[in-house]
Amino acid sequence: MKKLVIWDFDGVIADTEKLWLETRLELLNRDFGLNWSFDTINKYCGGMSDKTKRENLDKLGIVTSDDFWQEALKMDIEKINHGLRPTYGIIKILKNKSLLQCVATGGVFKKTMLKIKSAKLEKYIPIEYLFTADMVKKGKPDPDLFLLAAEKMGVSPKNCVVIEDSIAGMTAGLKAGMEVVAFLGCKMNNNQKYIEKVKKLGIKNIFFRMKDIESFLIK
């Protein structure tokens, strides 16, 4: 059994990654006339913090303002306030006291706390076991956030297993020298094209149900 389980939040603990990408896609197409598809926004921004998203867009020549990101955040919060539903089976795993677990997410702390409360997961994700993108200089796909989580939890990176849904997050976990498990149970990534991308990273453990993640973690 691994000593530390590091969970991503969006697209893993809750099927929310698509919500944030849809918001940014709507604003980019409106403000820049891009006519991007969902696949395009996912390619350039999937699984990343807003800071990293913004840096990637800058590299593409799409220079966004602070007002753009404030509007995106406002739209996100409206969606959060409608209520978020945890991924089926995740609560059972989070309740397992035999597993040392934490969350390392590309979201910022304040927004992540809102998501946790909206999904009614406060009792399962203590603040001291939550690590967010605004705690490091570089977010996913850089390894900094996962390395911070391992350090604060007192576990060597080689004894950590990262559970991710995004290519950026999986890349970060691999760069951190951790074992990476792909959870592709959420609708956005549950397709053969995406599965092939994950396999090209060298990730062998790919699961579509939390029940299978649970079996893997307690084997």
Image: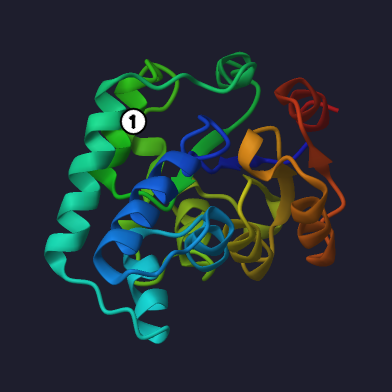
Q: Quadrant of the N terminus?
A: top right
SS type, badge 1 = helix
* 217 or 84, nearer to the observer: 84
Horizontally, residue 80 falls left or right of residue 74, namely right
Crowding at dot 1, Cα within 10 Å, few <14 / some 14-19 / many 20+, comes out as: many
* 97 or 9, nearer to the observer: 9
Image: 151 above or below 74: below
Q: Residue at x 62, y 13 (%)?
A: 92
Q: Quadrant of the C terminus?
A: top right
Residue indicated by mark 1: 115
Q: Is residue 135 visible?
A: no
Image: 187 above or below 199: above
Q: Residue at x 30, y 22 (%)?
A: 117
* 66 or 122, nearer to the observer: 66
Image: 26 above or below 185: below
Horizontally, residue 125 falls left or right of residue 168, namely left
Horizontally, residue 170 falls left or right of residue 151, namely right
Looking at this view, name the residue that lies furthest to the left. Answer: 67
Q: Residue at x 27, y 45 (%)?
A: 109
Q: Position of residue 160 (x, y in %)?
A: 66, 49
* Amino acid type, callout 1: Lys
Q: Residue at x 35, y 37 (%)?
A: 128
